[in-house]
Structure formats: C-alpha cells, structure tokens
Amino acid sequence: MLYLVGLGLSDETDITVKGLEVVKKAERVYLEAYTSILLVDQSVLESYYGRSITVADREMVESNSDEILRDAATVDVAFLVVGDPFGATTHTDIVLRARELGIPVKSVPNASIMSAIGATGLQLYNFGQTVSMVFFLDNWRPASFYDRIKENRSIGLHTLVLLDIKVKEQSLENMARGRKIYEPPRYMTVGTCAQQMLEVEADKQEGVYGPESLAIGCARVGGKTEKFVAGTLQELCDADDALGPPLHSLVLLGKRTHELEHEYVREFAVNKETWDRIWKADYQTK
Amino acid sequence: MLYLVGLGLSDETDITVKGLEVVKKAERVYLEAYTSILLVDQSVLESYYGRSITVADREMVESNSDEILRDAATVDVAFLVVGDPFGATTHTDIVLRARELGIPVKSVPNASIMSAIGATGLQLYNFGQTVSMVFFLDNWRPASFYDRIKENRSIGLHTLVLLDIKVKEQSLENMARGRKIYEPPRYMTVGTCAQQMLEVEADKQEGVYGPESLAIGCARVGGKTEKFVAGTLQELCDADDALGPPLHSLVLLGKRTHELEHEYVREFAVNKETWDRIWKADYQTK
C-alpha cells in the first residue's frame, strides 16, 4: 500500500494520530521536501517518529517515482507531504503512477494552508482561486497571478497568494559545470511579494489592486508563532521584520466582505486608522 | 486559554497529536456538533480521549458562549470542531468574544473539506468560492448558490458544494408547543443536491450548468470508506446508492481543466464513454 500522509503545517506534533500509526509501521518512509517545508528539521521528525526518513527531492518524485513505489503492492510505503497530501499537483501524479502499477493507495488528510488561512478571520467562503508567486528575475517576471487576481476581484473575492520557496537550487555556473553544489534555501517574504505585486500593477495598469489595497501578511500559519499583519500593500512592503521568519503567505482582500471579518482582522492592522478609513471607503458591504 | 481544536473529517484518530495533548489536559472539553459531524459517535471520542465531552449545540455556541468561556483566562478550555476550527463563521465569533473578555486563544488546525476535496484529483488551484446548499421546502428554495456558481464558471473554476445537515431540529408543531422533541438528523445526499441544482437551472434558465454538466459526487471524504462517483448532474441524481452513507458533498467542474485532472477523475466515472465524450466536447483545454 502507498500511503500519502499529510504532516500539517508546523511541527512534528501536527501529524494526525492515524498518520503517525502509518509512519511507525511503514517499511519505508519518504518526505517530499520541495513544495513546502515544516518549521522543524528532518532530524526532529526522525527522532519523533522513531524512523529514518528518505528526503525525496523534485527529481526523485517526478522522474524516479518507481523507486518510491518499489514493492508497494506488497509492503507499506509512507510518502509524507507537508500540509495536505493533495495540496500540490505532484502528488496526484504519483497516485496515477501507482494505479498503473496496480498499487493500492490511501491518503491521510491534514491541514493545508488553503484552509488554515481561515485563521486570518476571513471567511473561507469568500476566497476565490489560490495563486502562486515566484521570485522575479531580471528577464523573467511571470505574472499570470495578475489575471487570476483580477478574476477573483471582479467578483469580490479574496485571494490567497502562496509564495515561492527555493530549495536545493543550483547556481547557473554550478549547473553548467555539473557540480552538485546547492544554494542556501530561499523563502519569499510578504515584503517581496507586495513589492512584486505593485511592480506588476505599475506595468499593466489595469487597476486590479494598488498601493492602498488591503491585504494580510501571514507568517507560520498554524504554528505556535503564527503572526498576521494587516495593512495596505504599500505598508506590507515593510512588514517583514514584524512578521519574522518563514514561511510567509499573503491574502489580498476582495470587496465582498462581512462585518465580522473587519472586526477580526483590524486587530492585526499596522495602522488601525488607515485600515478603517480604506475599509469604510472601498470594502464595506453597503 | 481557549483552544480551538480541529478534529479532521472522519474518526477519532484524525485528531493531531498536538490536538490530542490539548484535549487530554484541558479542564473542560466541548464539541461543536451542528455545522458538521464526524463519522463516529461521541462515546467513541470520549473513550478514545479518556475525557467526557459536553456537546455544544448552536444555541449554546451562539447565545451562551460565556459558559464555554467561563474561567478560560485561568484554566484551559478545549472547543472541538469537526474539520478545521476556522471552517465555519461561528468560530470566529467565539474568538472575538474571547478577545473581549481578555482570554488568550490558540487554534490547532486540521484537515477541512475545503482542502481535502483535492482527493478528487481536481487541483485546488482551480477551485473558486465554495457554496452551501440547503434542503428546499415547498415555499423556501434559497438559490444564492446559483449566482456564485455562475461567477465561478464564468472564469472556468470548479465549485465545491457543501450540503445541508439538520441536527437537533424541531418540527413546527413541537416548536409551537414548546416540546423539546427533536427530529432524527438528516443529511443531504448528492442525489438531492443534483436534483435541486437542476430544478434551479430549470427555473432560472441562465445556462450556468445543465443535465450534461460534469460533476463529482463525494462521500465520507478523508475516511476509510471515502467514495467518489463522477458523472453528469443527471447521472448523479441516481448515485446515492453507489455513494453510500453520509456525509456527502459535490463538486461541479469548471472548464479550466488540466489533462491530469481528467485522467485522475475518469476512474470514478459512472460511464466512462459519456464522461470522455462530454469532457472532450466541453471541458478539454484547447
């Protein structure tokens, strides 16, 4: 049996009791470690589970999944995923491959950022499609998120923006020379995200959002040190110190809001007067 | 401290290790039991946790939350919620009340149907806003879901439809006579949902969806007996036997689809030929 086990969002104790039983009994245990990360190290997980773990990088999962699935028709293999097992497309892929090989699959759900984001106080019913943002390069600034945010905002919905993480990346030089030397991991911050969003708006000028649009910067959602900072996109450009270490994500507010959301979120505002003024002018459901 | 603890979707072992520690140590334990239910009885939870639980009905949570919050500034109170603690609006309300009373709050996230629905193989990125559907009465057929589905479909997105549950409801007669006699619980099925959707389309005739629109009926998502049935809305009107016992939910497909989604979902199709024909004609990304 292939078990896809969600680990939740934060530390070793976020696994479910059901998931922990699977991990303890499985023949082999893999950890998918490139679409997201927990806030604790692999060694913490290993000592907590009492098991050694093989870290599965993108190459292994996407090109060498048969190694992960080896003998899984007869022995139990646990594939651990941060958040919920079906949060990322990659994992439907491995299930399809298992089906082809006649391997039975079970999944153990867990918290995902896509639902845990309700901790902002914004109602999950008022969210549209989730978008991702990658680090811009000088000559590569993929902005498909802009059109999707536009769609969400056109019908009044909030948008969750998931931020790029770079783990096990090679520099161009090391790649060219075939050296397996990896750069230190990088995690996009809310400040970078807000900055990039404003740059794209300045390019496109379709008025999807602007420096005075309201948003919530989110850090370590679901963890003990979870932190929210609410403000304008301009204010959030400078909120990284207040938010602290990774992982970060951002929610851009839609205009179809509920008074309860206002009351809940303003507690997190950088500047409550600014927040109240803009909310009243642009967001309050009339 | 007030702890909001998510229980996940299915049985007693879906609680996280972190959540279980909170429940074992809390002074009082409440279970919110009207926005959703687990697939096991309260007695199973009580013996698993080794704790007695007070079931909190809607009246208690919405009108008498101060009893739940009593002394919570000095002792630990656990408020258990099926799924994720912030899945339903109700729970932001109790946090706001706790804030007013100066009671610190922590939440323990868990799987929510809003993310676990990824187990259908549809990509969470391709979902728009979630809608709810209630049981229609002769003279009361609230159809606000229709406009929201229209919005989602206009931008190509899938829609998760959450289905009504009726627990601790009184008949009009018993209510009028002040008798605290409650009707047996009722859970909307995919068949009823599909039927009601088609009735509303027949009334409104805006072509948001129709008998040949593709959808997935979902039962006991995240549980050991999880079951998906994919088909047209017309086919799903008769899928209740195949789906089995509650809880049910439904996903109406949007037209912005990925080939991987097709491959994954057709496995669940009532009739693969019909599914392929309609997918190819109406859904396949050109």
Image (tube, coloured by chain):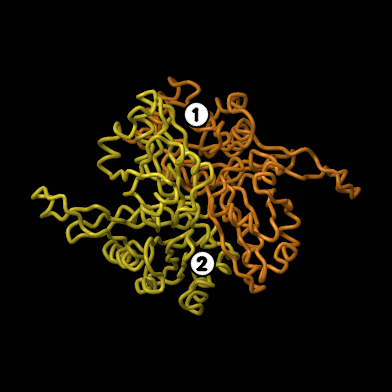
Chain colours: A yellow, B orange
Give the amino acid at mark 1. Answer: Ala
The residue depicted at 31 percent of the width and 56 percent of the height is A164
Disc 2: which residue: A283
Q: Is residue A1 left or right of residue A139?
A: right
Quadrant of the frame with the N terminus of chain B: bottom right
The residue nearer to you, when weighing B81 against B282, is B81
Q: Is residue A274 left or right of residue A161?
A: right
Q: Is residue B266 left or right of residue B44?
A: left
Give the amino acid at mark 2. Answer: Tyr
Residue A5 screen position, x and y as percent: 45, 42
Kindly report which numbered mark, 2 or 1, lies closer to the viewer in this rendering: 1
Q: Please, which chain is the residue tagged with disc 1 on? A: B
Assign a secondary structure to mark 1: strand
Task: Check the image and name the residue furthest to the left.
Answer: A177
The residue nearer to you, when weighing B228 against B45, is B45
Q: Residues within 10 Å of mark 2 (few under 14, many from 20)?
A: many
Assign a secondary structure to mark 2: helix
Residue A86 screen position, x and y as percent: 43, 42
Disc 1: which residue: B230
Quadrant of the frame with the C terminus of chain B: top left
The answer to whether residue B216 is above or below residue B71 is: above
Q: Residues within 10 Å of mark 1 (few under 14, many from 20)?
A: many
Q: Is any part of residue A150 visible from this angle?
A: no
Residue B220 screen position, x and y as percent: 58, 36
The answer to whether residue A185 is above or below residue A77 is: below
Residue B174 screen position, x and y as percent: 87, 44
Q: How many marks?
A: 2
- The Cα atoms of the two marked residues, 2 and 1, are separated by 39 Å
The residue depicted at 37 percent of the width and 63 percent of the height is A246
